[in-house]
Image: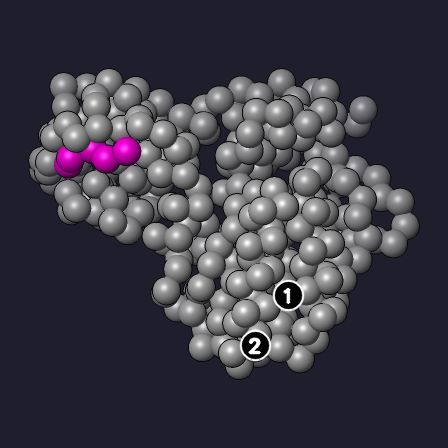
Amino acid sequence: MRPCSRRARRAACARVAACAWPRSWRGAMLRRMPRAHAALVAVATAVAAAAVAAAGPVAGGAPWLGVVLEPGSVGVRVGKVVPGSPAEDAGLVEGDEIVALGAARTRSARELVAAVAGHRVGDRVAVAIVRDGRRIAVHATLGPRLGDREVLERWLVDRPAPDFALDVASGAASGALADYAGRVVVIEFFATWCRYCPLAHRALAQLAARHPGDVAVLGIAGGDRKALAAYLSPKSAAASGSGVAVLHHGPLGFAALYDDKDAVKRAYLPVVTYPTIVVIDRRGFVRAVAVGASSAEIGRAVRIAEALARE
């Protein structure tokens, strides 16, 4: 196997670690990667799972604060605050750095998640933060964790869809959301190494074919351009230059757009699971999200899009 750069290895780990797949799916993804990367990804996944847990992607009765975490300079930086979460109720905002929760110091995402897990749903806890160079304390009442779809619904549904203009990889004349005004827009966030994304591709290609004038389907993928070009190629594709194994699919049956810097993904998805489908109505408001590749989730998104197309 051809060696790759440290930057490429980190990128590979980050792309997989950001996902919240069921364990069996994650294992399948690792098997598609070169062995040298699989061990790195497994470690990164464990670390990222702890960070994402604080944002509440796992359903159940465990306590939840409701923030998406990023590395900070003195603590754990709040990257996003989930609307309606205990964090929002407590007054936390993007850019705050959490340095302690209760009696526990929180210098890393792992420490913060452990501190939250040491409490119960309904506990009122002191959260020490650094904001604009000043240390202040707020109090949060921990709630029960939400599932991925619930987090995304709070983040997106009944709100204007974040605007974007991306380069087109295939299948469309425009990668600007504004150019599809007046039509129902269905966005699929996918990855070139995602084994289950083709299940969504097929259903959405059929949706686009049934409603050519009313529904626009846009597939958005991050990562390097060579990987996406290989994925979309009609010919058999090899691994991308990043060293991450790329599945070969061929043309999607709808538009594919490059999100090179993951800016659109960050705007839409505080929690990332592939595939994720976002349905936008003719007025430009998000009406539904679907998370994962189950036939129930994909089918629900398709039915909602078709209902909106008939309005």
Q: Which of 153 and 247 is in front in this view?
A: 153
| Mark 1 neighbour class, 10 Å CA radius: few under 14, some 14 to 19, many 20 or more | many
- Image coordinates of residue 104 in percent, x first then y, are 19, 19
The tag on residue 252 is none
At x 84% / y 39%, what residue is drawn?
238
Q: Give the range drawn in magenta.
A: 140-144
Q: Indicate whether 189 appears above or below 216.
A: above
Residue 56: image quadrant is top left
Q: Indicate whether 124 appears above or below 162.
A: above
Q: Which of 47 and 189 is in front in this view?
A: 189
For residue 142: magenta?
Answer: yes
* Quarter of the N terminus within the rendering: top right
Residue 264 in view of the camera: no
Q: Earlier in the sequence, mark 2 or mark 1?
A: 1
Residue 110 in view of the camera: yes
At x 27% / y 28%, what residue is drawn?
63
In the rendered image, which residue does mark 1 sit on?
Answer: 217
In the rendered image, which residue does mark 2 sit on?
Answer: 310
At x 39% / y 68%, what residue is drawn?
160
- Image coordinates of residue 29 in percent, x first then y, are 67, 30
Give the main secondary structure of the magenta stretch.
strand
Q: What element carries label 2?
A: helix
